[in-house]
Amino acid sequence: MAGVLDGKALATRMQADLAQQVKMLQEQAGRPPGLAVLMVGDNPASAAYVRGKERACAKVGIASFGKHFPTETTQAELEQVIQELNQDEQVDGILVQLPLPDHLDSVALLNQIDPDKDVDGLHPMNLGRLVRGEPGLQSCTPAGVMRLLQEYEINLRGKQAVMVGRSILVGKPLSLMLLAADATVTIAHSRTPDLAAMTRTADVLVTAIGRTELITPEMVKPGAIVVDVGINRIEDETGKARLVGDVQFEAVKEIASWITPVPGGIGPMTVTMLLHNTVWSYCQRLNIAP
Ligand code: NDP
């Protein structure tokens, strides 16, 4: 029976540490770190994520400058807002909540963010730094996965890692981080012909797919470490909405050595790494040791 990689517990501990650190930094620098979250439209899932991020900021003492715009906001208007936030001394982190309405070009907008305030780590400059192994702001979900594995002292060196999913948000940056930790990394995706044959080779199996419980126990090597990034909303028998991952948690738990739950695994780590990145960016910008 696998041990559970408890992201929620680690996130709680890290947020308590960050709250203390922010208190000290504020005394030193005279202002709290600041995070601006831009949301466009009224996608309910995005609104819930934004509320979660703002609550987490408040908990650790980060000032949040939430900006909520109507769906019809234009690209030029948003670019103007980003330029202003880039110049704003109170703002250390800027995040554009995705997805954006169809008429907006999210890549062009993300590219407008000052790379030193890019707390989502999605600017080409920060992705380039990741490729080169240079310090920089790293994408929150992949960084959260790595931090959780580190907490449980899981050594990745020489292990066969299979990353299912190749998005710019999760799969690609996480593959690079696994590689930097000396794992041998294979990336699988929707065009991989025999996914099960591939996943069965994994000492470390990471899924960022977005398909409800696609990964069955037959697809998992006994003793594997399984990290489930997926978040899928389903309705249970009573019609109540609940969240499940990409992995059949209960069945796979029987054969894996470690496994992350959904919820309570990578989700809370993602928010925590956003707070961490905001504090890191603040320290870099004010030239103080984190
Ligand atoms: P994307 O939709 O951008 O990427 C999904 C990836 O999965 C793609 O590379 C796709 O392949 C691949 N894929 C889809 N279907 C299959 C399949 N049947 N077999 C193999 N590969 C498949 O999603 P994201 O990367 O943004 O997110 C992935 C999941 O992680 C989602 O459930 C999302 O909600 C969750 N998530 C969770 C976060 C957290 O905090 N825990 C944060 C961010 C995301 P292809 O490229 O060929 O299309």
Image (spheres, helix red, strand yellow):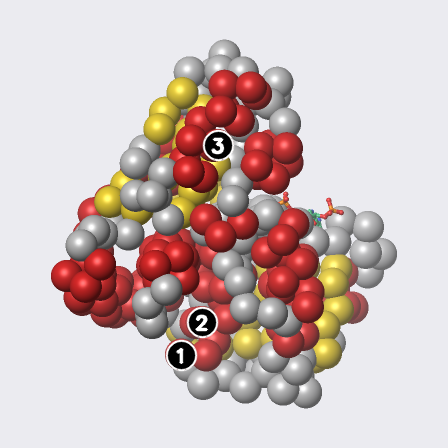
Residue 62 visible to an observer of this rendering: yes
Q: Could you say whether the residue bearing mark 1 is in a helix, strand or loop? A: helix
Q: Is residue 149 above or below residue 192?
A: below
Q: Quadrant of residue 159?
A: bottom right
Q: Which mark is residue 128?
A: none
Q: CA distance from mark 1 to mark 3?
A: 37 Å
Place of residue 130 in the rendered image (x, y in percent of width and height, measured from the top left): 62, 64
Mark-to-mark CA distance, 2 and 1: 6 Å
Q: Residue at x 74, y 63 (%)?
A: 187
Q: Quadrant of residue 181?
A: bottom right
Q: Are marks 2 and 1 in contact (CB under 8 Å)?
A: yes
Task: For label 3, count other residues whose C-alpha is less than 10 Å away and answer few (under 14), some (14-19) or many (20+).
Answer: some
Is the CB of the residue bearing disc 1 within 8 angstroms of ligand 1?
no
Quadrant of the frame with the N terminus? bottom left
Residue ID for mark 3 = 83
| Camera-side residue of 165 and 236 | 165
Q: Which residue is mark 2?
A: 147
Residue at the spot of label 1: 151
User: With respect to residue 97, does 230 lie above or below?
Assistant: below
Residue at x-position 45% and y-position 85%: 153
Q: Name the side, left or right, on which 202 lies relative to 256.
A: right
Q: Amino acid at mark 2?
A: Arg
Viewer-nearest of discs 2 and 3? 3
Q: Residue most toward the right?
A: 193
